[in-house]
Amino acid sequence: MILVDVVRSGYLESTHAGSVVALRPDGSRALSVGDPDRPVFPRSSNKPLQAVALLGAGWTPGDSQELALATASHSGEPAHLDVVRRILGDLDLSALGCPAMLPLSEPAAHALLAGGGGASPLTMNCSGKHAAMLATCVANGWPVENYLCPEHPVQQAIIAGIERLAGEPVRHVAVDGCGAPQHALSLPGLARAFAAVATATAGPARQVADAMRSHPFLVGGTGRDVTQLMQGVPGLVAKDGAEGVYAAALPDGSAVALKIDDGAGRARTPVLVAALRLLGATGPVLDELATAAVLGGGAVVGEVRVSEQLSRRLG
Protein backbone atom coordinates (compact mmCIF):
# COMPACT_ATOMS: atom_id res chain seq x y z
CA MET A 1 0.00 0.00 0.00
CA ILE A 2 1.16 3.57 -0.71
CA LEU A 3 2.04 5.13 2.64
CA VAL A 4 3.81 8.34 1.62
CA ASP A 5 3.54 10.89 -1.20
CA VAL A 6 6.35 13.18 -2.30
CA VAL A 7 4.97 16.39 -3.77
CA ARG A 8 7.17 18.87 -5.65
CA SER A 9 5.82 22.21 -6.89
CA GLY A 10 2.25 20.97 -6.56
CA TYR A 11 2.82 17.74 -8.51
CA LEU A 12 3.09 14.21 -7.22
CA GLU A 13 6.72 13.32 -7.84
CA SER A 14 6.95 9.87 -6.24
CA THR A 15 5.37 7.55 -3.70
CA HIS A 16 6.60 5.07 -1.11
CA ALA A 17 4.81 1.82 -0.34
CA GLY A 18 5.19 -0.23 2.80
CA SER A 19 3.59 -1.78 5.85
CA VAL A 20 2.68 -0.44 9.28
CA VAL A 21 1.02 -1.86 12.35
CA ALA A 22 -0.21 0.02 15.41
CA LEU A 23 -1.12 -1.94 18.54
CA ARG A 24 -3.41 -0.85 21.34
CA PRO A 25 -2.28 -1.44 24.94
CA ASP A 26 -4.13 -4.79 24.97
CA GLY A 27 -2.19 -5.92 21.89
CA SER A 28 -5.09 -5.64 19.44
CA ARG A 29 -4.48 -3.88 16.16
CA ALA A 30 -5.60 -0.28 15.86
CA LEU A 31 -4.06 -0.14 12.38
CA SER A 32 -2.77 -2.81 10.04
CA VAL A 33 -1.72 -1.76 6.54
CA GLY A 34 0.24 -3.53 3.86
CA ASP A 35 1.73 -6.89 4.81
CA PRO A 36 2.85 -6.42 8.43
CA ASP A 37 3.07 -10.14 9.18
CA ARG A 38 5.81 -10.64 6.60
CA PRO A 39 9.19 -10.91 8.36
CA VAL A 40 11.51 -7.94 7.96
CA PHE A 41 14.97 -7.12 9.23
CA PRO A 42 14.42 -4.30 11.76
CA ARG A 43 18.07 -3.36 11.49
CA SER A 44 18.97 -0.85 14.21
CA SER A 45 15.41 -0.82 15.55
CA ASN A 46 16.45 -4.09 17.20
CA LYS A 47 19.11 -2.36 19.32
CA PRO A 48 16.95 -1.69 22.41
CA LEU A 49 15.95 -5.38 22.39
CA GLN A 50 19.59 -6.41 22.08
CA ALA A 51 20.50 -4.16 25.00
CA VAL A 52 17.84 -5.80 27.17
CA ALA A 53 19.34 -9.19 26.29
CA LEU A 54 22.87 -8.04 27.13
CA LEU A 55 21.78 -6.89 30.58
CA GLY A 56 20.07 -10.23 31.09
CA ALA A 57 23.30 -11.97 30.08
CA GLY A 58 25.29 -10.24 32.79
CA TRP A 59 26.44 -6.89 31.44
CA THR A 60 26.55 -4.23 34.15
CA PRO A 61 26.95 -0.79 32.54
CA GLY A 62 28.69 1.87 34.55
CA ASP A 63 25.69 4.22 34.28
CA SER A 64 22.53 4.91 32.30
CA GLN A 65 24.48 6.83 29.65
CA GLU A 66 26.39 3.70 28.73
CA LEU A 67 23.13 1.76 28.47
CA ALA A 68 21.50 4.42 26.29
CA LEU A 69 24.53 4.40 23.99
CA ALA A 70 24.22 0.62 23.61
CA THR A 71 20.80 1.20 22.00
CA ALA A 72 22.06 3.94 19.70
CA SER A 73 22.78 4.56 16.07
CA HIS A 74 24.76 7.52 17.29
CA SER A 75 25.88 10.49 15.22
CA GLY A 76 29.53 10.21 16.23
CA GLU A 77 29.64 13.46 18.14
CA PRO A 78 32.27 13.79 20.89
CA ALA A 79 29.81 12.99 23.69
CA HIS A 80 28.89 9.74 21.96
CA LEU A 81 32.48 8.66 21.45
CA ASP A 82 33.38 9.37 25.07
CA VAL A 83 30.67 6.98 26.25
CA VAL A 84 31.75 4.24 23.82
CA ARG A 85 35.26 4.44 25.27
CA ARG A 86 33.83 4.11 28.78
CA ILE A 87 31.87 1.01 27.83
CA LEU A 88 35.00 -0.62 26.41
CA GLY A 89 36.90 -0.07 29.65
CA ASP A 90 40.28 -1.75 29.43
CA LEU A 91 39.61 -3.18 25.96
CA ASP A 92 41.51 -1.63 23.08
CA LEU A 93 39.53 0.07 20.32
CA SER A 94 40.86 -2.61 17.98
CA ALA A 95 38.48 -5.08 19.66
CA LEU A 96 35.53 -3.42 17.92
CA GLY A 97 34.32 -5.59 15.07
CA CYS A 98 32.26 -2.94 13.29
CA PRO A 99 33.66 -1.40 10.10
CA ALA A 100 35.41 1.95 9.92
CA MET A 101 33.03 4.78 9.04
CA LEU A 102 32.92 8.54 9.43
CA PRO A 103 30.43 9.97 11.91
CA LEU A 104 26.84 10.32 10.71
CA SER A 105 26.96 13.94 11.85
CA GLU A 106 28.37 16.07 9.03
CA PRO A 107 29.83 18.68 11.42
CA ALA A 108 31.45 15.92 13.46
CA ALA A 109 32.84 14.28 10.32
CA HIS A 110 34.20 17.59 9.01
CA ALA A 111 35.82 18.36 12.36
CA LEU A 112 37.40 14.91 12.48
CA LEU A 113 38.85 15.24 8.98
CA ALA A 114 39.99 18.81 9.59
CA GLY A 115 41.88 17.61 12.66
CA GLY A 116 43.72 14.98 10.66
CA GLY A 117 41.53 12.06 11.71
CA GLY A 118 39.55 9.66 9.58
CA ALA A 119 37.00 6.90 9.56
CA SER A 120 37.32 4.32 12.32
CA PRO A 121 35.24 1.65 14.04
CA LEU A 122 34.84 4.00 17.01
CA THR A 123 33.06 6.64 14.91
CA MET A 124 30.83 4.07 13.20
CA ASN A 125 27.24 4.58 14.39
CA CYS A 126 26.91 1.05 15.82
CA SER A 127 30.04 1.18 17.97
CA GLY A 128 28.04 1.48 21.19
CA LYS A 129 26.22 -1.78 20.54
CA HIS A 130 29.48 -3.52 19.69
CA ALA A 131 31.18 -2.15 22.80
CA ALA A 132 28.29 -3.44 24.94
CA MET A 133 28.57 -6.89 23.35
CA LEU A 134 32.28 -6.92 24.14
CA ALA A 135 31.67 -5.77 27.72
CA THR A 136 29.18 -8.60 28.15
CA CYS A 137 31.81 -11.06 26.95
CA VAL A 138 34.30 -9.70 29.47
CA ALA A 139 31.74 -9.93 32.27
CA ASN A 140 31.19 -13.62 31.51
CA GLY A 141 34.74 -14.63 30.64
CA TRP A 142 33.70 -15.33 27.05
CA PRO A 143 36.20 -14.84 24.21
CA VAL A 144 36.07 -11.45 22.55
CA GLU A 145 37.84 -12.36 19.30
CA ASN A 146 34.84 -14.03 17.67
CA TYR A 147 31.99 -12.21 19.40
CA LEU A 148 30.15 -11.59 16.11
CA CYS A 149 29.80 -15.28 15.23
CA PRO A 150 26.13 -16.35 15.49
CA GLU A 151 27.20 -19.35 17.59
CA HIS A 152 29.00 -17.20 20.18
CA PRO A 153 27.35 -17.19 23.64
CA VAL A 154 26.71 -13.45 23.50
CA GLN A 155 24.84 -13.79 20.19
CA GLN A 156 22.88 -16.77 21.46
CA ALA A 157 21.84 -14.70 24.49
CA ILE A 158 20.72 -11.89 22.20
CA ILE A 159 18.55 -14.08 19.99
CA ALA A 160 16.87 -15.66 23.03
CA GLY A 161 16.23 -12.23 24.53
CA ILE A 162 14.70 -10.85 21.32
CA GLU A 163 12.38 -13.82 21.04
CA ARG A 164 11.17 -13.38 24.62
CA LEU A 165 10.33 -9.73 24.09
CA ALA A 166 8.71 -10.20 20.68
CA GLY A 167 6.69 -13.25 21.70
CA GLU A 168 7.65 -15.02 18.49
CA PRO A 169 10.66 -16.88 17.07
CA VAL A 170 13.25 -15.02 15.06
CA ARG A 171 12.42 -15.89 11.45
CA HIS A 172 15.86 -15.45 9.89
CA VAL A 173 19.38 -14.47 10.95
CA ALA A 174 21.57 -12.49 8.54
CA VAL A 175 24.57 -10.16 8.76
CA ASP A 176 23.77 -6.52 9.53
CA GLY A 177 25.58 -3.58 7.99
CA CYS A 178 27.82 -3.33 11.05
CA GLY A 179 28.82 -7.01 10.79
CA ALA A 180 26.72 -8.24 13.74
CA PRO A 181 23.96 -10.84 13.39
CA GLN A 182 20.60 -9.33 12.43
CA HIS A 183 17.29 -10.93 13.38
CA ALA A 184 14.09 -10.90 11.32
CA LEU A 185 10.72 -10.36 13.00
CA SER A 186 7.20 -9.52 11.94
CA LEU A 187 6.14 -5.93 12.52
CA PRO A 188 3.63 -6.98 15.21
CA GLY A 189 6.43 -8.88 16.94
CA LEU A 190 8.66 -5.81 16.82
CA ALA A 191 5.85 -3.62 18.16
CA ARG A 192 5.13 -6.10 20.98
CA ALA A 193 8.80 -6.05 21.94
CA PHE A 194 8.83 -2.26 22.15
CA ALA A 195 5.62 -2.31 24.18
CA ALA A 196 7.26 -4.75 26.60
CA VAL A 197 10.19 -2.38 27.03
CA ALA A 198 8.05 0.75 27.38
CA THR A 199 5.76 -0.78 30.03
CA ALA A 200 8.33 -2.70 32.07
CA THR A 201 8.21 -1.89 35.77
CA ALA A 202 11.47 -3.60 36.73
CA GLY A 203 14.42 -5.58 35.40
CA PRO A 204 16.54 -5.12 32.27
CA ALA A 205 13.68 -3.87 30.08
CA ARG A 206 12.86 -1.10 32.56
CA GLN A 207 16.55 -0.17 32.75
CA VAL A 208 16.71 0.21 28.97
CA ALA A 209 13.51 2.25 28.82
CA ASP A 210 14.69 4.56 31.58
CA ALA A 211 18.09 5.04 29.94
CA MET A 212 16.64 5.89 26.53
CA ARG A 213 14.11 8.29 28.04
CA SER A 214 16.78 9.98 30.14
CA HIS A 215 19.36 10.31 27.35
CA PRO A 216 17.61 10.67 23.97
CA PHE A 217 20.56 12.64 22.63
CA LEU A 218 22.81 9.62 23.09
CA VAL A 219 20.36 7.39 21.19
CA GLY A 220 20.65 9.61 18.10
CA GLY A 221 22.25 13.03 18.14
CA THR A 222 21.89 16.64 17.14
CA GLY A 223 18.96 17.16 14.77
CA ARG A 224 18.02 13.48 14.68
CA ASP A 225 14.28 12.76 14.62
CA VAL A 226 14.58 9.82 17.02
CA THR A 227 16.08 12.18 19.58
CA GLN A 228 13.48 14.88 18.93
CA LEU A 229 10.59 12.42 19.28
CA MET A 230 11.73 11.06 22.63
CA GLN A 231 12.42 14.57 23.88
CA GLY A 232 8.99 15.78 22.77
CA VAL A 233 6.63 12.88 23.56
CA PRO A 234 6.66 12.02 27.28
CA GLY A 235 7.57 8.40 27.99
CA LEU A 236 8.12 7.43 24.35
CA VAL A 237 10.67 4.72 23.55
CA ALA A 238 11.63 4.89 19.87
CA LYS A 239 14.37 3.63 17.56
CA ASP A 240 14.98 4.18 13.88
CA GLY A 241 16.43 1.48 11.66
CA ALA A 242 18.06 1.37 8.25
CA GLU A 243 16.07 0.55 5.12
CA GLY A 244 12.98 2.45 6.20
CA VAL A 245 12.23 0.88 9.58
CA TYR A 246 10.90 2.58 12.71
CA ALA A 247 9.49 1.24 15.96
CA ALA A 248 8.14 3.07 18.99
CA ALA A 249 5.98 2.53 22.05
CA LEU A 250 4.15 4.79 24.48
CA PRO A 251 4.17 4.20 28.24
CA ASP A 252 0.61 2.80 28.13
CA GLY A 253 1.84 -0.08 25.94
CA SER A 254 0.48 1.11 22.60
CA ALA A 255 3.12 0.63 19.93
CA VAL A 256 3.98 1.13 16.27
CA ALA A 257 6.30 -0.67 13.86
CA LEU A 258 6.71 0.09 10.17
CA LYS A 259 8.77 -0.77 7.11
CA ILE A 260 9.05 1.29 3.93
CA ASP A 261 9.45 -1.17 1.09
CA ASP A 262 12.11 0.71 -0.88
CA GLY A 263 14.10 1.54 2.25
CA ALA A 264 13.55 5.29 2.00
CA GLY A 265 14.47 6.95 5.27
CA ARG A 266 12.59 10.13 4.40
CA ALA A 267 9.28 8.23 4.28
CA ARG A 268 9.34 6.56 7.68
CA THR A 269 8.97 9.50 10.08
CA PRO A 270 5.69 10.93 8.67
CA VAL A 271 4.15 7.45 8.89
CA LEU A 272 5.38 6.96 12.45
CA VAL A 273 3.98 10.35 13.48
CA ALA A 274 0.58 9.56 11.95
CA ALA A 275 0.39 6.20 13.72
CA LEU A 276 1.45 7.69 17.06
CA ARG A 277 -1.28 10.30 16.74
CA LEU A 278 -3.79 7.54 16.07
CA LEU A 279 -2.72 5.97 19.36
CA GLY A 280 -3.25 9.23 21.22
CA ALA A 281 0.21 10.81 21.26
CA THR A 282 0.31 14.59 21.21
CA GLY A 283 2.90 17.34 21.25
CA PRO A 284 4.39 20.09 19.05
CA VAL A 285 7.15 17.74 17.89
CA LEU A 286 4.56 15.66 16.04
CA ASP A 287 3.48 18.73 14.10
CA GLU A 288 7.12 19.49 13.28
CA LEU A 289 7.88 15.98 12.02
CA ALA A 290 4.56 15.18 10.31
CA THR A 291 6.02 16.30 6.98
CA ALA A 292 9.51 16.78 5.58
CA ALA A 293 10.55 19.55 3.24
CA VAL A 294 11.42 18.96 -0.40
CA LEU A 295 14.02 21.50 -1.55
CA GLY A 296 14.72 23.05 -4.92
CA GLY A 297 17.56 25.50 -5.31
CA GLY A 298 17.79 25.76 -1.53
CA ALA A 299 14.13 26.76 -1.16
CA VAL A 300 11.19 24.65 0.01
CA VAL A 301 9.24 23.57 -3.08
CA GLY A 302 7.26 20.64 -1.74
CA GLU A 303 6.90 18.11 1.02
CA VAL A 304 7.03 14.46 1.99
CA ARG A 305 3.70 13.56 3.63
CA VAL A 306 1.39 10.70 4.50
CA SER A 307 -0.52 9.55 1.42
CA GLU A 308 -4.22 10.08 0.93
CA GLN A 309 -4.63 6.29 0.99
CA LEU A 310 -3.14 6.02 4.46
CA SER A 311 -4.93 9.15 5.68
CA ARG A 312 -8.25 7.53 4.85
CA ARG A 313 -7.28 4.42 6.80
CA LEU A 314 -6.33 6.56 9.75
CA GLY A 315 -9.78 8.18 9.74
Image (cartoon, rainbow, N blue to C red):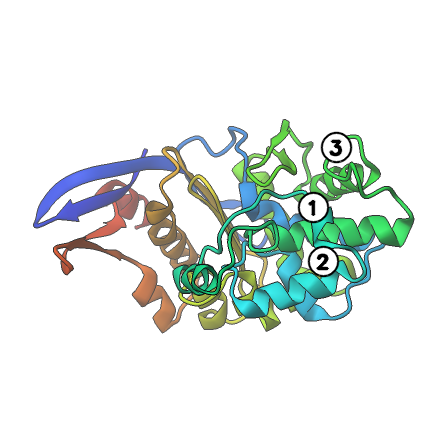
In the rendering, which numbered label is found on residue 285?
none
Sequence order check: which comes first, mark 1 or mark 2?
1
| In the foreground, 236 or 62 | 62
Determine which residue is flagged by label 2.
Answer: 205
| 161 relative to 292 in the view: left or right | right
| In the foreground, 55 or 137 | 137
Q: Could you say whether the residue bearing mark 1 is in a helix, strand or loop?
A: helix
Determine which residue is flagged by label 3.
Answer: 149
What count of labels does the image hold? 3
**Residue 278's image quarter?**
bottom left
Name the residue rendered at 54%, 40% in the picture: 42
> Which residue is situated farthest in the front direction here?
116
The answer to whether residue 22 is seen in the rendering is no
| In the foreground, 128 or 270 | 128
Q: Position of residue 270 (x, y in %)?
A: 33, 53
> Which residue is situated farthest in the right direction here?
141
**Residue 65's image quarter?**
bottom right
Determine which residue is flagged by label 1.
Answer: 165
Residues packed near mark 1 inside 10 Å, few (<14), some (14 to 19) or many (20 plus) = many
Sequence order check: which comes first, mark 3 or mark 1?
3
| 137 relative to 279 in the view: left or right | right
Q: Quadrant of the N terminus?
A: top left
